[in-house]
Amino acid sequence: MAKKAKAKPSFKTTTGNGGEPHQIATDGDRLTTNQGVVVADDQNTLTVGARGPQLLEDHILREKITHFDHERIPERVVHARGYGAHGYFQCYKSAAKICKAGFLQDPSVKTPVFCRISTVAGSAGSRDTARDVRGFAVKFYTEEGNYDLVGNNIPVFFIQDAIKFPDLIHSVKPAPDRDFPQAQSAHDTFWDFVSLNSESMHMLMWVMSDRAIPRSLRMIEGFGVHTFRMIDKKGDSRFVKFHWRPKYGAFSQIWDEAVMVAGADPDFHRRDMWNAINAGDFPEWELSVQVFTQEEADQFDFDHLDPTKLIPEEIVPLTPIGKMVLDRNVDNFFAETEQVAFCPSHLVPGIDFSNDPLLQGRLFSYLDTQLSRLGSPNFHQIPINKPKCPFANFQRDGHMQMDVPAGRVANQPNSLDNGGPREDPKSGFHSFPAEESGAKVRLRPESFADHYTQARLFWKSMTEPEKRHIVGGFSFELGKCQETHVRTRMLGHLNNIDRELGTQVADCLGMQGMADDITPVVPVGDPEPSKPLSQYAVAPKSIAGKKVGLLTTNGVDAKLLDAIRKAVESEGAMMEVIAPKIGPMKSSDGQSLTPDHFLAGAPSPLFDAVIIAPAKSEVETLLSQAAAIDWIRTAFAHLKVIGFNEAAAPLFEKAAVKTDADDGMVDVSDGSLKAFVQQAKQHRVWDREPTVRSC
Ligand code: HDD
């Protein structure tokens, strides 16, 4: 009996493999053209005679070169330089009380994610350690569709309305006539723009703080910035703000250090992230929400729809709801990190927008930008963007259609071809039915008018070192402005934020008494400090995830080396050995040892804490190297904890750094690392700072 032919599905859906390693069809080990034709010679172009002209008919050459010519796509207009990794999100327990989203219900479910962290202003080839906001974008591949939480590492934004975004970005990008400066805000057009927009003041405080020069992408916070809604099964809505907190705590570089690292290793952050994931030290963040009702929002002395305002945790505490772990590096940077397309408009049932005017503008912008960046409305078919749940609709055709939708019908409703996929009011996405009314106007709400109080809140919440760095940040950036009137206008704003701040920056610039008088539209409040706004008031005392550099020589004391490695690794940190040359050397017990770095390629700014412990017989080789002396000087200037052995004494003498300068200088000659580790857990020797720099 003939087998009954299997019924052809009336509608072919494609279940995406988004993010799974994507196998390209291969012909075993043989190199082929894109058409699958095996290539006989990939080293020589087809020519007339060995030394004659090339032939246009060389289809192998033309295919290869044409593909190469088209390898680049437009880089992102902002956030061009970023780094991404795969991982998962897991909720701690069901969040059903506030949110019906499927991925927040079952703690046993791991929802796959892709996270991309970026700088904003620099182009794709710029440096990692620029002073800048870090984008923090997460794509959750949930069973109900893709959800994108596209935030930053700073909880507020420069502007209140999306219509100003192109101006903000044009002002911070290189000037259009000269195409510099690259990847920095320290120039006139930026400071001119923000000083003409007092709503930027709060964000500027964050950007001039240490937050904008993170130590590691694994050590930054993330924020959804806007107020969003969460909706429960009954259809009740509450407002939420999203917070990501890193497992290791938030840590930063010193500005001068960030500048040096930019030269020594422009890929410092991406290398750190890649290496950590490969070593199994997975970056991890806790996701929390601040949940509040409309009635509670009505009591705030700011507008919860204003993206230049945060909600102090003293008013609405954080509720942890789950964690994200990044446990897999990409297989291909372009296919995944470059082609990933985030859109704040990608929502799942249970989460919805608020009327924040900046968010509303973003809802249009991202889908639009993907069309020109990725070139097709089919960008959702690229593996990294594909939902991992089934998806089916009658959208058809377009550039680079990768699926092969079968059947003669491409409309719904229809009564042909079994009808095809239909809406489902029960499980489908419903917008929260908020009641809206009012005249059509272009008007900024009066409740958005206070531009200084929260900037002052931030200033007042800082520790002394953090305040010093904010003063240093403003002074550096304004010092780079050539136009005096831009500087004096900015000084006027700083005085409105806080007199102490304005005076200190004016002192550093040598512009005392030159500030403009700027009258705030509404009186500036004097809020109580909020401790969680400070990085260092709440920083964990730990070296986990950090790196200790040991500068040494041939003949290094084997016992000391072993003791350092054990002490550092038992705290979850790493040790790396730096020697004058990269070739193999011998430790005191005759064992062969290959250093991780050679001196000229690894200055001390690349490490969180350092130890200088040469063999006595070899100290001369370091004494003659400026890089070795600089190693000590910069580590001291960057407030690092410095361990040393007796043999290192002449190096310190030459560097004019006293080995008893402060508690951060630790003698490790006897092999005891306890005091060194204790000190390194403070992150920096803050008390040293006033002795090494004034602004
Ligand atoms: Fe944006 C990219 C975050 C305001 C328009 N934005 C982009 C990325 C992040 C953010 C993290 C990079 C995503 C990735 O890794 O691919 N943007 C923010 C935050 C904002 C914000 C937290 C304010 C709270 N952005 C904003 C506004 C607009 C845009 C107001 C336009 C009206 N953003 C874009 C964009 C980008 C983008 C032009 C460039 C590349 C992309 O979207 O995919 O559409």
Image: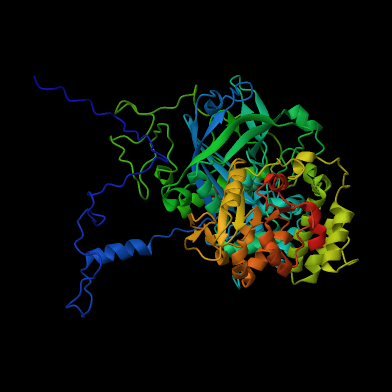
Q: Is 236 situated above or below 187?
A: above
Q: Quadrant of the C terminus?
A: bottom right
Position in image of residue 313 (x %, y %): 76, 35
Position in image of residue 665 (x %, y %): 74, 55
Quick one: 583 or 72, which is closer to the camera? 583
Q: Is residue 205 visible?
A: yes
Position in image of residue 196 (x %, y %): 76, 60
Q: Is residue 343 left or right of residue 687?
A: left
Q: Residue furthest bottom?
A: 51
Quick one: 477 or 97, which is closer to the camera? 477
Q: Residue furthest right?
A: 513
Residue under the image location 47 percent in, 54 percent down:
372
Q: Is 39 situated above or below 177?
A: above
Q: Is residue 262 left or right of residue 402?
A: right
Which colour style is shown? rainbow
Q: Is residue 79 visible?
A: no
Q: Is residue 184 left or right of residue 294?
A: left
Q: Quadrant of the N terminus?
A: top left
Position in image of residue 601 (x %, y %): 55, 64
Quick one: 378 or 690, which is closer to the camera? 690
Residue under the image location 22 percent in, 49 percent down:
27
Residue under the image location 53 percent in, 46 percent down:
276
